[in-house]
Amino acid sequence: MSWRSSSRGVVLTAYHPSGGGDDAPGGYYYILCLKMLTNDCFWVYVYSRRSGQYTMNHDHSKKIPDGASFDRSGSQDSLDELSLDYYWKELENINETRGNNHEEGVALVVKEPDEGELEQEWLKEAGLSNLFEESSGDSQESIVLLSTLTRTQKAAVEKRVETVTQTLRKKNKQHQIPDVRDIFRPQNDSKGKVCDGIEPSTVRTSENKHETQDGTKGSKFSLGTDEQKSQLEDMPSSDTDINLEIPFAEQAANLKDSSVGNMCKGGGGDTLLPNFRLPKDKTGTTKIGDLAPQDMKQVYSLALIELTALYDTLGTEFKQQKAVKIKTKDSGLFGVPLSILLDQDQKKVPGTKVPLIFQKLIAQIEETALETEGLLRISGAATRVKSLCQELEAKFYEGTFNWENIKQHDAASLLKLFIRELPQPLLTVEYLKAFQDVQSLPTRKQQLQALNLLVLLLPEANRDTLKVLLEFLQRVIDHRDKNKMTLKNVAVVMAPNLFTFHGFGSKSIEQSEFLMAAGTANVMRFMIQYQTLLWTIPKFIVNQVRKQNTERQKKEKKDKAMKKLLKKMAYDREKHEKQEKTPNDTDVPQGVIRVQAPHLSKVSMAIQLTEELKAGDIVARFLSQKSGNVQTLNKEEVFLYEIGGNIGERCLDGDAYMKDLYELNPNAEWVIKPKQT
């Protein structure tokens, strides 16, 4: 028996060997005592491995053992005993449901990685595997990526490269093992062949202010350390402003005064969550779904590197879990992988991005139960829910299921069951622990920054489903006057459904259900409260994508084979361009852009750039040109796109200032079209 203290309270763990009483033969049970931060009451929770049940007691007379200390600044201090009571009751309901469906459960095995394997997998996910594997692809992509990294991002890469290097040397494997110093060596160093021709971020200073070969001002999206420090010093800051222009890890590294962000610590009721906001960006806000797939692939790599750099800077361990493949159901509704569900749903509804059963359950609740008191908190009868589940499996796709048979709390129970029964968690095996560890970051602003990056790392199907879930939970909270489900209550009830994944099933995870109860509930609160911010792509990542595209274009121009091809075609191309460009040059003078709109009656228009002209103004101008021969489109259906130059494709925010954006990407084309769904 032992005492352990932490920011969550005092933990008393008692292990009973085999043969110990009726409640623990063949295993053990343990007791967790939590000193709640709102008063001196003890809550005692007893877990039995055999029954899978929790019992709860509390005693105001109990005192904390001598020497136990508590950190009252943790993110969980806003949750009181009543809130956690809801958490444990939800956990009891979950275990009861799993007990009834025990024969259907499949444990997911998490592979224990070998030394250096985790880091090697990280480099692969970050798009840097060819630093060690020559056959994995063109090294140019890695070189371009490395050339755009910030100081803290480089440090994160160097740390993983060093670990893999040492591991490969120990194993005596025949790999090309680079020296970490060579990877980021400045281009003017004759020994630095790996980054030849690429300007490392560490040596970018005043030269960034000069125009690049493509006419773009480097200072517009350069990420050199000196410039970052200058921007951090010059930019007016607020504890509630989320700065998306400076990388999050750089902000953490340059945080000189530890008192900054103190207001984001501590807690209280729902009203005490900071009112975080995004300051207006003149070049427009970029949301998930606004960028082309090739740009999003780069966003993923950069988000992984930035998240790792942020965790490294804050001294928090970041490790991805790796699941061993297991056999799963290849049809049905519950316990089916999201990818398979979407494959079968898209045959019925082409283009759907969220499972149809998930959408229908939410729609059913919103139609009949949003004002029901205790919605989500009160569970439907386990036997009835199981029967409904089986009936849905048989009749849902046939369209013969009678939705009038579902009681209000049953639909909510089925929704939570769907989430829990996914073969892999909605937050993914790889990143579930990282989502949980967000609670350990020092300030709420840093917690929000980490969640933003984690959302970017989720697979598209998981991210889309999570978004629909969070939007639904907010609508439940909007009816709190009737259903009594506040943000805190909803978060506490939903946290065990997203964070206590049944597939792990180990002793450490069972104990962590206690230890992380309040913490994961607060992570859930953040995800609901700040969901709009979480689906925003930080500007510094978009700028790094632009920089990568620019560097890639410069490398392509230097390719010898391309030069020979261009030389052969030079005369014909030059002649053709003169014929095509002569009228355009007179039509599009300096300070004017030509906007194409192939889906509208006015297919092309020259637009004079002004300081106040926004993307939405251009769309409105085109839509004002009426024609009976072309299908009428609303302002909500079409958007202005920035295509080419230093970005693949980007759907523009209507508030984006066009002159600022033109200066950022002067070689782009501008096209109005419907948004791809």
Image: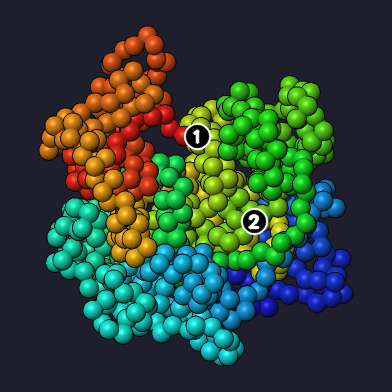
Which residue was labeled with disc 2?
Answer: 500
Between marks 2 and 1 in the image, the one whose residue lies nearer the viewer: 1
For label 1, the SS is: loop
Identify residue type, mark 2. Thr
> What's the residue at 26%, 82% (across, down)?
189
Q: Quadrant of residue 308?
A: bottom left
Q: Is residue 142 above or below residue 294?
A: below
> What's the residue at 67%, 41% (across, down)?
343
> What's the residue at 13%, 35% (across, down)?
589
> What's the residue at 60%, 38% (across, down)?
354
Give the x, y percent position of residue 478: 48, 31
Viewer-nearest residue: 329 or 432:
329
Viewer-nearest residue: 284 or 183:
183
Mark with earlier residue (2, 1): 2
Which residue was labeled with disc 1?
Answer: 677
Q: Residues within 10 Å of mark 1 (few under 14, many from 20)?
A: few
Q: Is residue 652 visible from the viewing direction of this image? A: no
Left or right: 259 as drawn, with respect to 155: left
For label 2, the SS is: loop
The disc at residue 368 is: none
Viewer-nearest residue: 152 or 409:
152
